[in-house]
Amino acid sequence: MVTLKNPFILALDVSDESLAFDLATQVGERVGAIKLGPRLLMRGIAPRMAALLPNTPLFFDIKLFDIPNTVEASLEAAVEMGAKMVTVHGLGGRSMLQAARRVEQRHSDLLVIPVTILTSWTNQDLTANFQSWSIRQHVSVLLELVADLGFRAVVCSQEEMDLAHGFGLKTVIPGVRLTHANEAGATVNFHDQKRVGDLKQVLQRGGWAVVLGRAVVESPDPVQTVETILCEIAELQRRINGWGIE
Ligand code: C5P
């Protein structure tokens, strides 16, 4: 199992390598995990990042969706490059997910996390062939498959978190913002995210981990924003008696 020291996954969503390494140097060992997407992984930074952050799991958010053989080989390559957490698409189907699960079973310290339906989608974004069902129904079917195959965690929005917990799955929640900043009069930018949740509420409702990217990397002082998030989590942790991150 991958152990996170806290539930804050920082999405290092910047294209500039030196900016990525500056931020990782300053806060990388304090957050629960560092999430890297294709924009940085394609630049080949993973081994250097893994060497810089020996105590923080690297989360490769590559959302693989391909034939089973390709997915299996790609996941093995991700492991070689230092991935401890990696995403595949739940929509890739049973055979593809079985291939992904085989890789997870070969590596005891790897968490393969199927993504359900993107948090940037509403029901209106479902294409015509999907539209007779709501997002919630789609997610429910994907969760049943994912749980049946033995996965331990999924990516979903805070709106479907209850469903995932019902299947005994840990939840990784993107589309998270610090909405109390809004109450304080500041404008909270949801960017392209639609099924959005508040940091504290998501954790209070049992979210295993939260992903925050632009709320941090686009803030005027990213290091200070990380500190604020960590303080909020520590405060919550004192009130909720642990939420079992292991
Ligand atoms: O900037 P923001 O906090 O919205 O970033 C969310 C991150 O989580 C992005 O890196 C995005 O690719 C990722 N993600 C997501 N929705 C999913 C899966 C991953 O937003 N369903």
Image (cartoon, helix red, strand yellow):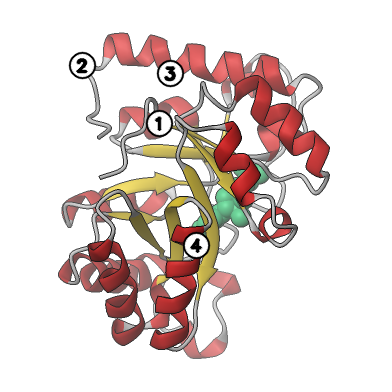
Residue 4 location, quadrant: top left
Of mark 2 and mark 1, the one earlier in the sequence is 1
Q: Is 4 or 131 nearer to us in this picture?
A: 4
Closer to viewer: mark 4 or mark 1: 4
Residue type pointed to by label 2: Asn
Q: Is residue 188 visible?
A: no
| Residue 116 in which image quadrant | bottom left
Q: Give SS at disc 4.
A: helix
Sequence-first disc among 4 and 1: 1
Q: Which mark is residue 233?
A: 3
Q: Amino acid at mark 1?
A: Pro
For label 1, the residue is: 7
Name which of mark 2 and mark 4 comes first in the sequence.
Answer: 4
Residue type at the position of mark 4: Ala
x then y, percent, for residue 45: 69, 50
Residue count near mark 2 (Cα–Cα under 10 Å), binned few <14, some 14–19, many ≥20: few
Q: CA distance from mark 2 to mark 1?
A: 14 Å
Mark 4 or mark 3, earlier in chain: 4
Task: Tell me if label 2 and label 4 are in contact, CB under 8 Å.
Answer: no
Which residue shows up at 57% across the image and 83% down it?
127
Residue of label 2: 241
Q: Percent from the top left, x then y, of residue 205? A: 30, 34
Q: Label for residue 78? A: 4
The amino acid at mark 3 is Ile
